[in-house]
């Protein structure tokens, strides 16, 4: 009887999407240059493509970034409306959005980076993410800026 | 000898020769046939630590302990994994358990020394390293660690003597090579220090201490790359969470300054600040690849001098 190979807990789980896996550096740069919406979507997809063993945690991070941004925008709006936050301090308060997005992006990057190294070690061939990153940063970002979407949605996507 | 024993011995042999990936393959084969071997899980944990796969290493050590809670080797592996993850109190608890089970183990004394070193308790680390050497005088790892600790406390002559002793019997001992390299560098013999670093990196290109030595040599020769290495060492010392918090903290300070400067009547400073930040980003982007290219070049060029 053939024995099953012993699998280490940090090894990527192979999936049909493996051929679309990229170095997580590209989703990270996309998040910085093209906005949170594109970057987070790419991180979530890359997690499935890499077969990351921590993908549940990674998707929870994506949800935290999206819903956390909504909660922060709402809270800042309430604080401004009630007079607890002075208008000249508004710009500082909005830095919390940036902090949340960048913090989550780094957490996602670090989680996927370890899995990506093992993916490459076992012969996985990543795609070059640079063309898509440039496309999203130039065309995607421009299209996003031209849309007349509600403020809350734009805050999440930008 | 059973097939498991054979695979385990092969793994030990590979590990001793620095072929960690091959050792991992042997242990995976063995565990694929029988996943309930505590020693194989503990040994696999040690191999994974060498490859910096700390999450998996911790899980393997936990599995070893689950299978055999009274195994000193499993406690030792769990402790070494905890030291690598900087969970020092947890490491101490495992080492205390291991020592209770096996009081005269040199490997446990060595792990205590590494724990105290990580904690910054140099005197206790030195005491444990000496104890390890007394308990097992034939293992070259313990005098090499002692040499590194002697160098750390400033006794360069003693460190050099210990490292040379180790290298006489084991010329490919990476830790001893690094200690001797650091001694050469401290004595101003940069070329010799470079030879030691290159030799150590050829044996184990991923060894942190060898990379630190090579970086110190490069830093002595080029201030720009040395600056990057110091920055990189500062950022990456400690956990990955600490590194991320530091990087985001720097970015946040920059963004706060961009808002605060115009609000405080200094709008003329926002331009220079932005350029400085841009330069910093470009530098941290370019410097690592320059650094690694130059290290690679060094490794290609290295020829050991007669009498090395």
Image (spheres, rainbow, N blue to C red):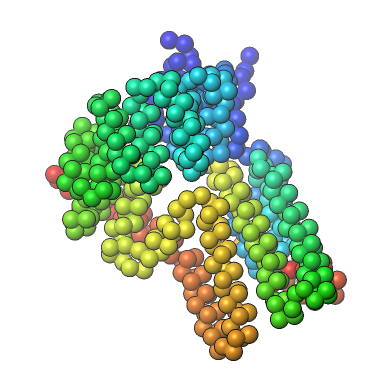
Task: State which quadrant residue B249 falls in.
Answer: bottom right
Task: State which quadrant residue A68 falls in.
Answer: bottom right
Task: State which quadrant residue B102 falls in.
Answer: top left
User: Which residue is drawn at the image coordinates 58% and 51% (left, top)?
Assistant: A110
Q: Quadrant of the N terminus of chain A?
A: top right
Between A90 and B209, the residue placed more toward the observer is A90
User: Which residue is drawn at the image coordinates 65% and 68% (left, top)?
Assistant: A33
Q: Position of residue A78 (x, y in %)?
A: 82, 70
Between A151 and A147, the residue placed more toward the observer is A151
Q: Quadrant of the C terminus of chain A?
A: bottom right
Q: Position of residue B32 (x, y in %)?
A: 57, 22
User: Which residue is drawn at the image coordinates 18% and 55% (left, top)?
Assistant: B187
Please indicate whether residue B111 sits to the left or right of residue A145 in the image: left
Q: Position of residue A99 (x, y in %)?
A: 65, 64
Q: Is residue A135 visible?
A: no
Q: Is residue A145 visible?
A: yes
Q: In the picture shown, does residue B36 fall above or below A21?
A: above
Number of residue marks? 0
């Amino acid at each position: 009887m053939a024995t099953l190979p012993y699998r280490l807990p940090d090894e990527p789980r192979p999936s049909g999407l493996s051929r679309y896996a990229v170095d997580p550096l590209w989703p990270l740069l996309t998040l910085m240059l093209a906005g949170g919406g594109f970057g987070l979507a790419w991180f979530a997809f890359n997690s499935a493509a890499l077969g990351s063993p921590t993908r549940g945690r990674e998707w929870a991070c994506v949800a935290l970034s999206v819903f956390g941004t909504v909660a922060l925008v709402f809270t800042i709006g309430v604080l401004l409306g009630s007079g607890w936050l002075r208008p000249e301090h508004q710009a500082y308060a909005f830095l919390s959005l940036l902090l949340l997005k960048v913090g989550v992006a780094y957490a996602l990057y670090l989680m996927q980076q370890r899995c990506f190294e093992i993916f490459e070690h076992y012969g996985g061939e990543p795609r070059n993410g640079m063309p898509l990153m440039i496309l999203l940063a130039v065309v995607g970002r421009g299209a996003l800026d031209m849309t007349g979407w509600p403020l809350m949605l734009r805050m999440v996507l930008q | 000898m059973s097939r498991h024993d054979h695979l385990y011995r092969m793994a030990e042999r590979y590990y001793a020769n620095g072929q960690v990936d091959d050792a991992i393959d042997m242990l995976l084969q063995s565990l694929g046939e029988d996943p309930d071997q505590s020693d194989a899980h503990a040994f696999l944990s040690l191999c994974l630590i060498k490859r910096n796969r700390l999450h998996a290493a911790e899980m393997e050590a936990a599995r070893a302990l689950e299978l055999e809670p009274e195994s000193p080797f499993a406690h030792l592996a769990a402790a070494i994994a905890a030291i690598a993850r900087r969970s020092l109190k947890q490491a101490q608890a495992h080492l205390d358990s291991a020592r209770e089970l096996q009081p005269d183990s040199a490997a446990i004394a060595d792990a205590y020394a590494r724990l105290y070193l990580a904690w910054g308790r140099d005197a206790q680390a030195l005491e444990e390293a000496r104890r390890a050497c007394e308990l097992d005088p034939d293992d070259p790892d313990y005098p090499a660690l002692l040499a590194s600790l002697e160098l750390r406390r400033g006794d360069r002559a003693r460190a050099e003597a210990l490292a040379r002793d180790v290298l006489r019997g084991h010329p490919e001992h990476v830790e001893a090579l690094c200690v001797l390299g650091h001694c050469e560098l401290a004595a101003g013999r940069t070329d010799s220090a470079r030879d030691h670093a290159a030799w150590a990196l050829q044996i184990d290109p991923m060894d942190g201490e060898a990379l630190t030595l090579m970086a110190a040599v490069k830093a002595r020769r080029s201030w720009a790359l040395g600056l990057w290495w110091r920055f990189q060492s500062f950022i990456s010392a400690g956990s990955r969470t600490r590194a991320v918090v530091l990087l985001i903290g720097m970015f946040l300070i920059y963004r706060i300054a961009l808002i605060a400067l115009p609000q405080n009547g200094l709008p003329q400073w926002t331009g220079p600040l932005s350029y400085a930040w841009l330069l910093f980003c470009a530098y941290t982007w370019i410097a690592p690849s320059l650094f690694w290219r130059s290290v690679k070049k060094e490794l290609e060029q290295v020829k050991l001098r007669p009498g090395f």
